[in-house]
């Protein structure tokens, strides 16, 4: 049961990011994405990947290796599409948290190499990452809740529906394994995903006709 749930959680998590990768990397749509949230997503993936290595958790390792690559691609697309986000002043504000997370992951590995107890280091890392993960979801969530006129066209609904299923699976997996860090982090993610899905559905349904993307007719030229 636990193995099956872990496999389901890993599979769903791996698929979560790719609808957003398709929208942002293939079509260049990045409006509505939070730069701080995107940076933190990359940093959190690195920390959870490190946690998986420390505790020998295969589903964690596989999930965050693949999802980390996808989140990095989305971040790169965001920075490429919006050059102002690459300025030193903005990076100091949006990327600082991700830099701290990267240092935390690297420091955990160094501590184990130097002889610290793996279980203790993993517990500290997971506790810190769980707390940061809860906070990391706030920029994106608050942005769509408070910005009622904000353009959300670049946010993939499929990504958030898959995210809700993924977080639900990880919550159950963490509960069955007795890993509070996993189920607390996934539980908060589930709450954010459900709220985001509701907001996206409401906004798209209530979008006035004048605000809907115009359908441009293509002119067909007859051959001479």
Image (cartoon, rainbow, N blue to C red):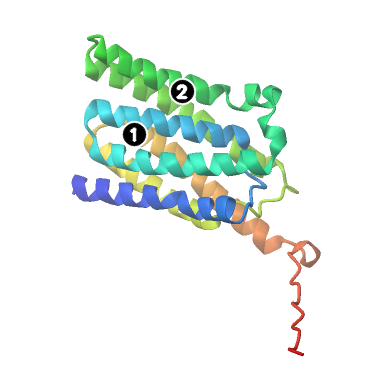
Which numbered dot is residue 182? 1
Image coords of residue 153 (percent x, y): 66, 55
Instruction: Count neighbours of disc 1 (C-alpha within 10 A) and say few if under 14, some if 14 to 19, many if 20 or more.
Output: many
Q: Image quadrant for the C terminus?
A: bottom right
Which label's residue is closer to the chain start, 1 or 2?
A: 2
Residue pushed farthest front?
224
Image coords of residue 204 (percent x, y): 66, 60
**Residue at position x 26%, y 45% from top?**
6
Q: Total of numbered circles in the picture?
A: 2
**Residue at position x 60%, y 58% from top?**
201
- Answer with the quarter of the image where residue 186 lies: top left
Residue 85 vertical position relative to residue 202 in the rendered view, above or below: above
Which of label 1 and label 2 is nearer to you?
2
Image coords of residue 140 (percent x, y): 60, 39
Dot 2 falls on a residue whose secondary structure is: helix
Instruction: Count neighbours of disc 2 (C-alpha within 10 A) and say few if under 14, some if 14 to 19, many if 20 or more.
Output: many
């Amino acid at each position: 049961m636990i193995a099956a749930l872990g496999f389901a959680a890993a599979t769903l998590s791996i698929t979560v990011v790719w609808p957003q990768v398709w929208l942002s990397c293939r079509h260049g749509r990045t409006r509505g994405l939070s730069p701080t949230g995107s940076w933190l997503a990359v940093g959190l993936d690195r920390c959870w990947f490190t946690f998986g290595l420390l505790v020998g958790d295969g589903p964690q390792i596989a999930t965050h290796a693949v999802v980390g690559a996808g989140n990095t691609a989305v971040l790169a697309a965001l920075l490429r599409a919006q050059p102002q986000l690459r300025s030193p002043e903005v990076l100091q504000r949006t990327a600082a948290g991700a830099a701290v997370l990267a240092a935390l992951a690297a420091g955990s590995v160094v501590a184990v190499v130097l002889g610290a107890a793996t279980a203790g280091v993993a517990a500290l890392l997971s506790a810190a990452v769980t707390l940061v993960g809860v906070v990391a979801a706030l920029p994106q969530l608050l942005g769509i809740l408070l910005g009622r006129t904000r353009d959300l066209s670049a946010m993939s609904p499929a990504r958030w529906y898959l995210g809700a299923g993924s977080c639900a699976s990880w919550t159950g997996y963490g509960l069955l394994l007795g890993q509070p860090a996993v189920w607390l982090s996934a539980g908060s993610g589930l709450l954010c995903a459900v709220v985001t899905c509701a907001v996206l559905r409401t906004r798209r349904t209530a979008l006035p006709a004048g605000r809907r993307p115009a359908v441009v007719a293509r002119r067909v030229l007859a051959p001479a």
